[in-house]
Amino acid sequence: MARYVYSCTACGQRFEVDKPMTAASEPSACPQCQAPGRRVFTAPGITIKGSPIKFSGGEEVEGGSPEPESGCGSCANGACPWN
């Protein structure tokens, strides 16, 4: 089951409904006035857990890595990951 947000076509009330993904596009009745509700598209509720990535320079970067300020050692042998 997934949770979807709907907006009532009559009174404008927003409400949430748990229903199967196969039925997501079907209208749902407003709990306040029983008129049909239209699905409202919202950003997904995604939570990323864990600590930020730490590098030897002490800086923290979430979701990626900074370009090194000086050579990382790989550039000397032609295997630089930043080029």
Image (cartoon, rainbow, N blue to C red):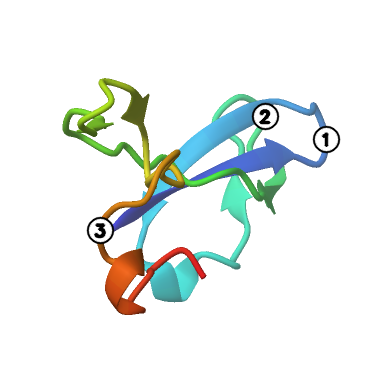
Look at the numbered disc 2 and give the secondary structure of its residue: loop
User: Looking at the image, is mark 1 or mark 2 earlier in the sequence?
Assistant: 1
Q: CA distance from mark 3 to mark 1?
A: 65 Å
Residue 6 spot, x, y in % from top left: 62, 43
Q: Nearer the viewer, residue 81 or 15?
A: 81
Q: CA distance from mark 1 to mark 2?
A: 8 Å
What amino acid type should be assigned to the residue bearing mark 2?
Cys
Q: Which residue is mark 2?
A: 33
Q: Nearer the viewer, residue 43 or 64?
A: 64
Q: Which residue is mark 3?
A: 73
Whether pointer 1 and pointer 2 mark residues with C-beta atoms closer than 8 Å, the reply is yes
Q: Nearer the viewer, mark 2 or mark 3?
A: 3
What amino acid type should be assigned to the residue bearing mark 1?
Ala
Asked if 34 appears above or below 14 in the picture, the reply is below
User: Looking at the image, is mark 2 or mark 3 earlier in the sequence?
Assistant: 2
Residue 57 spot, x, y in % from top left: 28, 26
Dot 3, how many residues are within 10 Å of its Cα: few (below 14), some (14-19), or many (20+)?
few
Q: Nearer the viewer, mark 3 or mark 1?
A: 3
User: Looking at the image, is mark 3 or mark 1 earlier in the sequence?
Assistant: 1
Look at the numbered disc 3 and give the secondary structure of its residue: loop
Residue 33 spot, x, y in % from top left: 67, 29
Q: Which residue is mark 1?
A: 10
Q: CA distance from mark 2 to mark 3?
A: 68 Å
